[in-house]
Image (spheres, grey):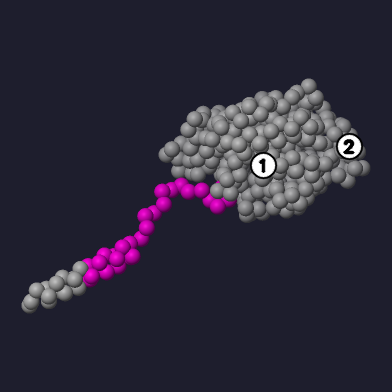
Amino acid sequence: MGKEGSIVQCSLLGLICIVAVQLIYATVLPPLPLLPLPTARQLIWQRREQIMFFHFGMNTFTNVEWGNGRADPTLFYPERLDARQWVRAAKAAGFSLVILTAKHNDGFCLWPSVYTNYSVKSSEWKNGKGDVVRELSEAAREEGIDLGLYLSPWDQHEPSYGQTEQYNEFYMAQLEELLSKYGTISEIWFDGAKGKNAPNMTYMFNKWFGITHELQLLVNVFSDAGPDIRWVGDEAGAAGITSWSMINRSDITIGGTQNQLLNTGDPYGKDWVPAECDVSIRPGWFWHRDETPKTVQELLDIYYKSVGRNCVLLVNVPPNTTGLLSTEDVAVLSEFKQSIDSI
């Protein structure tokens, strides 16, 4: 074989080798993902950065943080209530999801639940025909804002509280009302908060989580232990300097004392449950006349210690007794938005 033939032969062999290598690489599967991974709904939640909480209810009118379930329903009278004002203020400040305390631990319901008379239907507001949850859900839908709800497990008014089976049935019935009558719910809030002298009570959390995901396919469930979002372990809006999205849910008891673990997460955790950092714009969670909002600089510091540390910030802005967000709170939110936009 001449020199030219050898060159041709080498070229053909080289081409065959290149094709063979390409075929081999084409059939090799990509590496498996390193578990755990976030769900699509968790990614949507994470990209929000900020969520707004509305603590509103009987406590707003009795001027306390924790009621006792015995306040007269006629005290609830938000004469100028305007849920659209709440939602527009949230939207203007850059928030894409708002959460309402549909029922706090005093047991007073902001919707006309068929399972109790301790609700807006026993108030004189709108002649007992009002429904705060309905008004907020409609306002949020009109403004393109998503809705979340908090339904307190502890209920100081309900007589069946302390009787595990009866109360869990009652609670799940109210939960089903909220999840089936007010459109899409993007986040539902559960916690283990209760007073030291509260009756012993076993909450059937797994059943609650199941019915929630069954009725609302896109909802994220919040609790100390998730399953979708976890509490950060404090109410200062501050995550650990390193805050992992991973955690072992089996290590967490809802209402327990694992605050440090909740604050930092676990780099070796087997469950993807990112943290939500809750804080109020005022000293209290409900509106009180003698309190003032945090400064913009204080909110920015909280923003860096929450969103800046891999978490979502949940800012509580409580409506006042007229049923409106206070002017000074809205002004601070506006300045806060401008500061974030300038970063």
Q: Is residue 31 magenta?
A: yes
At numbered mark 1, what does the secondary structure look like: helix, strand or loop? loop
* Residue drawn at 79 percent across, 41 percent down: 85
Residue at image position (87%, 32%) is: 75
Where the N terminus falls, by quadrant? bottom left
Q: Nearer the viewer, residue 315 or 92?
A: 92
Q: Which residues are magenta?
A: 15-42
Where residue 217 appears, as percent x and y from the top left, is 62, 54
Placement of 114 over or under 257, stated as above or below = below
In the picture provided, is 34 more to the left or to the right than 333? left
Q: Nearer the viewer, residue 35 or 158?
A: 35
145 lies above or below 311: below
Residue that numbered label 1 is attached to: 94
**Can you tell which mark lies on residue 79?**
2
Residue at image position (46%, 36%) is 266
Q: Nearer the viewer, mark 1 or mark 2?
A: 1
31 or 121: which is nearer to us?
31
Residue furthest left as drawn: 1
